[in-house]
């Protein structure tokens, strides 16, 4: 396994540990980076290709899934396998990688447990996992400023210009709810037993219950 595949495997394993689930399959064999192949897989009206994109097809019984990560992201994964994110470009790449792995893990886990999942739920968990994973990596390097990280992800980020109105609304809703949830994790300490219990319970709730849970949080 190359360095980028090892990084993606470690990322998947860490998320699975947080949520106490068994990954249905290792992620590396499902990653593609060939833009020509991506163009053949996407519908003609799909719009511009993105740097990270989860590709899903199914017939109600079987699910086909791939995770597209462009070559630049895979090079970033190789670097991030050796060190913590050191600058804004590192963080931007890390967040795209986490988002893709988070989506892949949650979708495949839900599929194997025969539970429904929506695009909004995938985006919600993607945003939560982006913050928590970057926070943990920086903590391990002794360089965590969770408040600055929180502001960069939830207050200073901008939507991609090619999103249509429905996609933009979904991303904004997911970010708003994830921001409220993640405010509980601004203290500069690793995730403890109580935090992991909350994450594991939250992960298993249906989407409406997750949103009610977040609406009821006090900060």
Image (cartoon, rainbow, N blue to C red):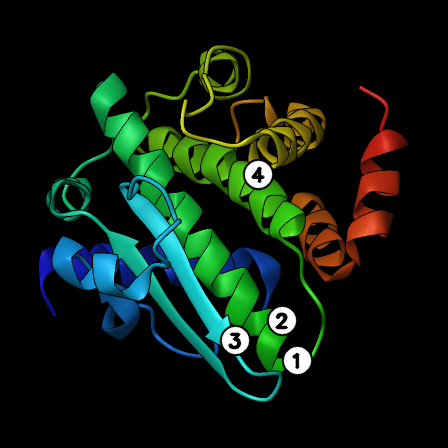
Tell me the distance, in whole angstroms, between the alpha carbons under discs 1 and 3: 11 Å
Question: Secondary structure beneath disc 2?
Answer: helix
Q: Nearer the viewer, residue 44 or 168?
A: 44
Residue 4, which numbered label?
A: none
Which one is earlier in the sequence, the residue at label 1 or at label 3?
Answer: 3
Question: Which residue is labeled 1 in the image?
Answer: 113
- Contact check, label 3 and label 4, Cβ < 8 Å: no
Q: Residue at x 54, y 12 (%)?
A: 155
Tell me the distance, in whole angstroms, between the alpha carbons under discs 1 and 4: 22 Å
- Contact check, label 3 and label 2, Cβ < 8 Å: no
Which one is earlier in the sequence, the residue at label 1 or at label 4?
Answer: 1
In the figure, residue 3 lies in which quadrant? Answer: bottom left
Q: From what the image shows, is residue 14 above or below residue 190?
A: below
Tell me the distance, in whole angstroms, between the alpha carbons under discs 3 and 2: 11 Å
In the figure, residue 219 lies in which quadrant? Answer: top right
Q: From what the image shows, is residue 49 above or below residue 95?
A: below
Residue 180 rendering spot, x and y as whole percentages:
71, 25
- Contact check, label 1 and label 2, Cβ < 8 Å: yes
Question: Which residue is labeled 3 in the image?
Answer: 22
Residue 114 rendering spot, x and y as whole percentages:
68, 80
Q: Nearer the viewer, residue 117 or 168?
A: 168
Q: Residue at x 61, y 51 (%)?
A: 119
Circle 1 crowding by C-alpha within 10 Å: few under 14, some 14–19, many from 20:
few
- Contact check, label 4 and label 2, Cβ < 8 Å: no
Tell me the distance, in whole angstroms, between the alpha carbons under discs 1 and 2: 5 Å
Question: Which residue is labeled 2 in the image?
Answer: 110
> Which mark lies nearer to you, 4 or 2?
2
Residue 128, which numbered label?
A: 4
């Amino acid at each position: 396994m190359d360095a980028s595949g090892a990084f993606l495997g470690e990322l998947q394993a860490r998320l699975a540990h947080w949520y106490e689930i068994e990954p249905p399959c290792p992620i590396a064999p499902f990653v593609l980076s060939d833009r020509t192949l991506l163009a053949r897989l996407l519908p003609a009206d799909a719009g511009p290709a993105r740097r990270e994109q989860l590709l899903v097809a199914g017939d109600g019984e079987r699910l086909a899934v791939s995770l597209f990560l462009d070559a630049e992201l895979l090079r970033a994964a190789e670097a991030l396998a050796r060190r913590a994110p050191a600058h804004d470009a590192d963080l931007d790449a890390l967040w795209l990688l986490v988002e893709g792995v988070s989506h892949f893990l949650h979708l495949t886990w839900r599929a194997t447990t025969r539970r429904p999942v929506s695009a909004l739920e995938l985006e919600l968990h993607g945003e939560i996992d982006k913050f928590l994973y970057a926070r943990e990596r920086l903590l391990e390097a002794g360089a965590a400023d969770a408040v600055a990280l929180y502001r960069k992800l939830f207050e200073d980020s901008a939507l991609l210009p090619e999103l249509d109105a429905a996609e933009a609304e979904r991303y904004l809703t997911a970010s708003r709810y994830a921001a409220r949830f993640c405010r509980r994790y601004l203290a500069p300490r690793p995730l403890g037993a109580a935090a992991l219990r909350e994450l594991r319970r939250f992960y298993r709730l249906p989407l409406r219950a997750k949103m009610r849970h977040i609406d009821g949080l006090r900060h």
